[in-house]
């Protein structure tokens, strides 16, 4: 999850520092050494505004520490591969915040509300492996950030509503997965193929949360083209290939016993996922960053037709990612509107424009398969995703302003 611009499906989002949700990853080992960050710039510079330069062999920050509060990392890719930047917890696994798909010569901003503590930064040129790492410290700050009672009520409501949404989608994922594995192990392949994209919808709507568990995500959602050397394949996409083997060369169908093994494994992992989701809490900056993250999932896999390589059901996933991104946006919309009404209007308009293009590809209760799209239709969808991604990149800063 072979794709030339893919990344391994080992990314995550989990509970944030100090009891709030953050993204969590179990990153595969890589032998790259960290390049030491530079020290803070001179007097007068905002200590919470940092720069990051990512290259093939370095991840250079403008400072190794910053005071607690809203931090902004301007990440510039000085290399020739697409890169990512992570702010990780002190265990090197918990993703507090991330910015992905930073192309060569491009700068992208990451905004996060970080409490005092010890962190790890990581650039991932090529979007694979453990990344180039360094230590980062957020120091105590005596600057108090006050939120009036009305805004605090909106914040509390947004966080509670999003938690309920994730829990509901996880419960529906579990229900549909049970139905799916019963059909699959029972040899009812036509019915299993029909249910596959429907069940997957509930995963894709909360993908940035579902991916948060570094031990579960690669077991459930890894794609064959993204497997690390020696990684055993399991999960949704292995079963997808078994149900749609037409594009595979010299494929040997799974035996009944193998089907039962992989199906039972998928169901057990889905049950574990649902159990863990109940324990998560969310902050408004995590919700806003999650909305952007879901659109990035669309840009890197769904709009290119690489997510559902065997079934060609990418548009179901595309719609589900958009659904989840829009729910996250609408949750924080009341907070953003009085602060940046122009951004709020732009986001609403561009979500509507993207949805209109998706609606053109509906067929019955679902969508046409990806291979039925013309190059012009793919380009129109891609352009609409890019148009929405730009204002979404400014959402977190607006929420925290």
Image: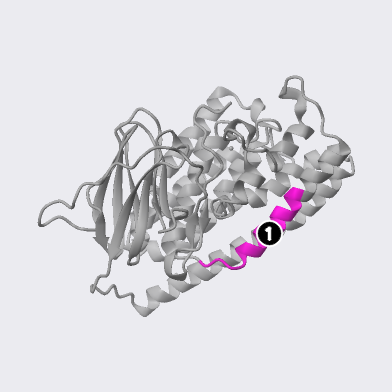
Q: How many other residues sit within 10 Å of disc 1, few (<14), some (14-19) or many (≥20)? A: few
Residue 193 locus on image (x, y percent): 79, 39
Residue 328 locus on image (x, y percent): 50, 58
Would residue 244 be found to the left or right of residue 69 on screen? right
Evaluate whether residue 71 shows in this view: yes
Residue 306 locus on image (x, y percent): 59, 32
Instruction: Give the vertical position of 201 relative to 129 (above or below).
Output: below
Residue at the spot 54% in from the left edge and 54% down from the top edge: 212
Residue at the spot 30% in from the left edge and 65% down from the top edge: 69
As drawn, the residue found furthest toward the left would be 43
Residue 270 covered by magenta stretch: yes
- Which corner quadrant of the image does residue 35 belong to? top left
Residue sitting nearer the eye, 292 or 6: 6
As drawn, the residue found furthest toward the top would be 249
Tell me the residue that label 1 is attached to. Answer: 272
Residue at the spot 41% in from the left edge and 41% down from the top edge: 131
Residue at the spot 79% in from the left edge and 54% down from the top edge: 178
Image quadrant containing the C terminus: bottom left
Image quadrant containing the N terminus: top right
Tag 1's secondary structure? helix
Magenta span: predominant SS is: helix
Evaluate whether residue 170 shows in this view: no
Instruction: Give the vertical position of 168 relative to 367 (above or below).
Output: below
Would residue 224 be found to the left or right of residue 141 on screen? right
Residue sitting nearer the eye, 262 or 97: 262
Residue 277 locus on image (x, y percent): 61, 63
The magenta segment = 265-281
Residue 54 covered by magenta stretch: no
């Amino acid at each position: 999850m072979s794709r030339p611009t893919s990344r391994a499906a080992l990314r995550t989002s989990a509970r944030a520092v100090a009891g709030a949700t953050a993204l969590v990853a179990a990153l595969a080992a890589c032998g790259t050494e960290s390049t030491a960050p530079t020290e803070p710039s001179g007097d007068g510079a905002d200590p919470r505004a940092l720069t990051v330069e990512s290259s093939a062999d370095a991840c250079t920050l403008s400072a190794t520490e910053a005071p607690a509060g809203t931090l902004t990392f301007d990440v510039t890719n000085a290399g020739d591969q697409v890169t990512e930047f992570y702010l990780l917890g002190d265990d090197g696994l918990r993703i507090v915040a991330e910015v992905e798909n930073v192309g060569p010569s491009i700068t992208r901003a990451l905004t996060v509300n970080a409490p005092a503590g010890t962190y790890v930064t990581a650039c991932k040129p090529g979007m694979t492996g453990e990344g180039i790492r360094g230590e980062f410290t957020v120091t105590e700050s005596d600057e108090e950030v006050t939120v009036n009672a009305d805004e605090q009520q909106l914040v509390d409501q947004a966080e509670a509503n999003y938690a309920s949404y994730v829990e509901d989608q996880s419960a529906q994922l579990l229900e549909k997965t049970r139905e799916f594995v019963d059909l699959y192990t029972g040899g009812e392949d036509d019915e299993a193929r029909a249910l596959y994209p429907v069940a997957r919808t509930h995963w894709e709507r909360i993908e940035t949360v579902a991916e948060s568990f570094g031990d579960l995500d690669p077991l459930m959602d890894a794609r064959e083209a993204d497997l690390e050397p020696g990684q055993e394949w399991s999960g949704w996409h292995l079963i997808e290939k078994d149900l749609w083997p037409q594009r595979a060369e010299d494929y040997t169908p799974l035996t009944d016993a193998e089907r039962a093994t992989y199906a039972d494994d998928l169901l057990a992992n889905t049950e574990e996922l649902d159990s863990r989701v109940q324990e998560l809490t969310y902050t408004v900056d995590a919700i806003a960053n999650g909305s952007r993250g879901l659109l990035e999932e669309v840009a890197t896999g769904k709009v290119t037709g690489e997510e559902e390589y065997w079934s060609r059901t990418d548009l179901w996933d595309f719609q589900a990612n958009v659904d989840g991104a829009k729910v996250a946006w609408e949750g924080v919309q009341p907070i953003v509107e009085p602060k940046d009404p122009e951004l709020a209007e732009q986001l609403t308009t561009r979500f509507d424009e993207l949805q209109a293009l998706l609606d053109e590809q509906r067929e019955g209760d679902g969508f046409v398969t990806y291979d039925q799209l013309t190059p012009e239709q793919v380009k129109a969808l891609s352009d609409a995703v890019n148009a929405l991604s730009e204002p979404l990149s400014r959402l977190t800063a607006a929420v925290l302003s």
